[in-house]
Structure formats: structure tokens, C-alpha cells
Amino acid sequence: MSTVIGTTGLVKRYGRLRAVDGIDLDVRAGDVYGFLGANGSGKTTTVRMLLGLVLPTEGEVQLLGEPMPTRARRVLPRVGALIEGPAHYGHLSARANLSLLDAAGPGGSRRTRTARIDTVLEQVGLAGVGRRPVKDFSLGMRQRLGLGAALLRRPELLVLDEPTNGLDPQGIHEIRDLLLELNRAGTTVFLSSHLLAEVEQLCTRVGVLDRGRLVLQDQLATLTAPTGATVVETPDADRVRAALDGRVLRTSVGRAVVRGADPAEVNAALVAAGVPVTGLALERPTLEEVVLAAASTSADRVDAPGERSRR
Ligand SMILES: Nc1ncnc2c1ncn2[C@@H]1O[C@H](COP(=O)(O)OP(=O)(O)OP(=O)(O)O)[C@@H](O)[C@H]1O
């Protein structure tokens, strides 16, 4: 599968701080790639380097097979981007803002342009806001407008920095559906997030940034593959231990984890021993467990100045 975003040894230094510390991103065509990291781990800086908004201190960026930022003029029209705090003209409506952006690029007759903007307003759920100036928009509405701007050119690649920032649960759900729909239609999506649940529900591939370093990068399905054990739900976990002597790895209230990846066999053994079973499933690590095992920092940890440069 072709590489859509590739970086090699990407570094961004701010003084002594290595905000991004030698990362090799590998995002392939058709991925929904979740770029996870605690606050301050370097996500936004990376996104800015991908788009040529910040120059790397070291390393290389390839976007859609072209080197960045040297080929930015050729590549960026094929990329839709939403970065932190999208800027809009506050006194203008959503439509007027999108019209201005659309007018800056190529794109046919006035009717074609109007139809394109209608489609985008519909897609991001702003079709009904009419002439309301953007300065009266909520944070979530501004975020929707930013996403609309990213979609205007029907991009092959969407690069989104915290796309659901400021949205309520319903809004998050809508944007998730929209991104999945775009992906099904062929758009590669790269999104940064500090929300594990969001990435777990949306992404096919995951990269985890920890204090500027990419500590994990793999398919979500591989990261959360079955462990080889079976989870038994039961009102009496102690009886599972008695029935399957030596195979029980751990128990908690209402739950026992048993060695062996054949739930039917485990069930048969428990039923034969008269142990009530209310549920059976293969054990899989959650993304949260995988990330916690790989990354050292908590979401709100703040290192003393110079910590990162000393490593
Ligand atoms: N222009 C800058 N000058 C100096 N330091 C910077 C600059 N931009 C970012 N940093 C520092 O680089 C580190 C990474 O910041 P970055 O914004 O990329 O992280 P992030 O993962 O996007 O965090 P958040 O989720 O909070 O936006 C932080 O310690 C930040 O303070």
C-alpha cells in the first residue's frame, strides 16, 4: 500500500527542548490514522511540520509522495487540513467564509462553487445557520466550519489536529460518521487526538507520541489482538478457580481470566462442573492498556524546563 505520509528522523527543537524527537511516521493510503499523545507531547508541532507551516530542525517529510515543504504548492491543494483554532472572518457567515476560501482556488463556474459550498455545509452540519456571523458561533460550530474548509477541495488526505475539540457528544458522533464516510470514499485521514476512545472507535492505525518520541506505531487490530486467554463472566469467580485448577490467571468481582483461547472449550468445562457462566469472550487489551504500557507520561504532567533535552 502506498505511503501517504512518511517522515524520517523528524526533529523539531525549540532551544534546548526537543518538541519532536526523531519520528518516523508511516501513514498509508486508506488509513484512518490516530496520532495519540498527551498534551504537550508534540502532536501539533508534528502536524505543522507535515503541512510545511513549521520547518523541521532535522529530518524529512513526504506528503503524497512529494517532499515537503519544497513541493508544498503542488501537494497542499490535494490535502485538507484543520489545525488548532482555525481562523475565520468573525463578521461573515459560514457560507461567506467558505466562499472566500473557495474563491482562492481553482474550481469552475459560480454555480459549481455554490453547489460545492452547499455540499460542505451539509456535510459538517452547518446548512441551517444562514447569515449568522461566525463570531456568534460556539466552539463546536467553529470547529465544524474549520472541517468544512478542509473538505472544500475534496482532498485525498485530511490532516486534522484534534478535530472534535469543543464538540458535544452528539457532535463528536456526527463528525466521526462523516470521517468514516469520507474514508470509505477513499480519503486517507490523519488525526491527532488525546482521546483514546475517539481513536479506538475511529482509527485503523495508531501512532503514540510520548514527549516527542513515537513509542508505538501499528495497526489497531494488531495492538488489540487477542492475548490467548478467555474472559469468563460469572457470579462466582472462585468456583471457576476450583473447576479449572491451574488455568485461572486472575479473578475479580464477577470475572475470571482463564488461559486458553477457546471459549467453547472453557464453557464446556465450566458447565460440566456446574459453574454458572453469564458471558465468555477472548481477552483483548484495550487501547488504553496498550498506550499506558508504551508511554510514560500522564496527560497533565508538566516536566521541569530542560527535562526533555536531557534525555
Ligand atoms: N513555538 C514554540 N516555541 C517554543 N516551544 C514550543 C513552541 N511550540 C510548541 N512548543 C513546545 O513544544 C512542546 C510540544 O508542543 P505541541 O503543541 O506540539 O504539543 P501537543 O501534543 O500538540 O499538545 P496539545 O495537545 O496541548 O496541543 C510543548 O512543550 C510546547 O510548549
Image (cartoon, grey):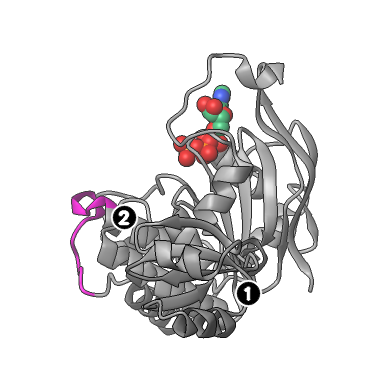
**Residue at x 61%, y 38% (from the top left corner):** 210
Q: Is residue 157 at least partly visible in the picture?
A: yes
Residue sitting nearer the eye, 131 or 225:
225
Spot occupied by residue 213 in the image (x, y as percentages of width and height): 68, 37
- How crowded is the residue under tag 2: few (<14 C-alpha within 10 Å), some, or many (20+)? many
Relative placement, left or right, of 222 versus 82 is right
Relative placement, left or right, of 218 versus 39 is right
Q: Mark 2 points at which residue?
A: 142
Examine the residues drawn in magenta and state their main secondary structure. Answer: loop
Q: Is the residue 171 above or below the residue 166 in the image?
A: below
**Picture quarter with the N terminus:** bottom right
Q: Amino acid under label 1?
A: Ala
Spot occupied by residue 189 in the image (x, y as percentages of width and height): 58, 66
Relative placement, left or right, of 222 versus 67 is left
Question: Which mark is in front, 1 or 2?
Answer: 1
The part of the chain drawn in magenta is 128-139
Residue 273 belongs to the span the image colors magenta: no
Q: Mark 1 points at which residue?
A: 261
**Residue at x 37%, y 76% (from the top left corner):** 123
